[in-house]
Image (spheres, rainbow, N blue to C red):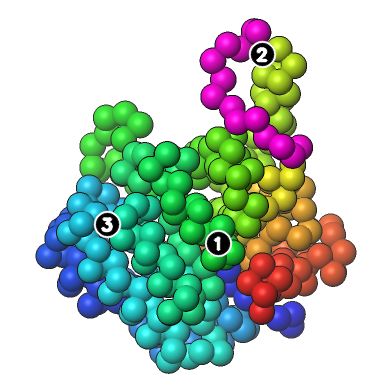
Amino acid sequence: MPEIIDSYSHIGSEAVLDEFEKVNPSVELSSLRNAPRLFAVDGRIDYLDRYGIDQQVISLVGPNMWLGADPEDSFEAARLANDEVRDIADQYPDRFLPIGNIPFLTGEYVDEARRCIEELDFHGLQIFSNINGRMLDDEAFEPFWETVDDLDVPVWIHPQLHDWHDYDEGSTWIYKMMGWPFDTSIAVARLVFSGIMDRYENVEIVSHHLGGAIPYWIGRVRSWYQTRQEEPELYTNPDLADLSEPLDAYFDRIYGDTAVSSQGESYPLRCGYEFFGKDNVLYGADYPFGPEKGEYWTQTIPQAIEDLDIPEEHKRKIYSENVKSLLDL
């Protein structure tokens, strides 16, 4: 068996839910209590052992519980969440690789990002693909990206819901299913084309669900960028930064995990591998979510990797070597 490091999983804490319920109660928040495997640390070790997973990156669960929350009211809950993830990792330091959760990107949350790395010794930071509808290249978030550049740690982007148009709460699951890959794609594209990744050369991104739709859309992305460079007089209102490097130089700093939510289809993984290349695909199973209480994808993703017609060396990179290089392990 190859060494396996799961680069994207989620974990929760009853203490965090209790604290957050005081400031932003919601159906989303309450529903997390219905999955006790989110909080069962010993049970998670059993899961890792059963599937031969050597280590697991753990991040705080539940992006949607932050929707509509007041950043000032939620700050203590955010700090507690990071402390809880650190405590969980400390119980099994050889198995868990913790990353911090930064739900908002201004003010004291920028200081919290620094605390996560410098005091809690996290391996990176998780943010969301939009912050209550504000895009990640918003001018107000510039100090956050400056801090990330200074800390020189990767940023995991988890998709977040947004009111693209009116929809009822009962349809939220459809927007997670179809809208999350879209929102991830928009977030990554804006970081590139706004110049964030040009200004901050140490920024590296782990995009959940194998980059959303970007691997499928990449030809369209490159074509649109080329036409706007060649005929600026035809496209009079493109909000594009004057990038100093070729487009692919920025995509080379973006990674995608294998959690494409497939049910036996191999082409999404092949598409992601063709786009990201051998060095930027990371094994990730999105545990504890998915069919069979989060274990279906853990069973099927390795087979999908094995079915790829690629060198064994590249498979080892996907399973563990790429994330070890990214995290300097």
Q: Earlier in the sequence, mark 1 or mark 3?
A: 3
Vertical position of residue 148 compared to residue 79: above or below: above
Element on which disc 3 rests? helix
Q: Is residue 109 left or right of residue 158?
A: left
Residue lying at the far top in this picture: please name it: 234
Disc 1: CA contacts within 10 A as few (<14), some (14-19) or many (>=20): some
Q: Residue 134, located in which quarter of the rendered image? A: top left
Q: In terms of depth relative to the viewer, which is nearer, 62 or 265?
A: 62
What residue is shown with label 2? Answer: 232
Report the magenta residues as a range: 233-247
Residue drawn at x 59%, y 34% is 193
| Residue 55: x %, y % from top left | 58, 81
Q: Is residue 180 above or below residue 96?
A: above
Residue 265 in sight here: no
Mark 1 element type: helix
Q: Quadrant of the C terminus?
A: bottom right
Front label number (2 vs 1) = 1
Q: Quadrant of residue 325?
A: bottom right
Using the image as rendered, state which of residue 52 and residue 196 is in the foreground.
196
- The residue at which mark 1 appears reads as 150
Name the residue: 44% across, 51% down.
143
Foreground label between 1 and 3: 1
How crowded is the residue under tag 2: few (<14 C-alpha within 10 Å), some, or many (20+)? few
- Amino acid at dot 1: Asp
Residue 15: image location, x then y, percent: 23, 77
Q: Can residue 316 be seen in this view?
A: yes
Image disc number at residue 65? 3
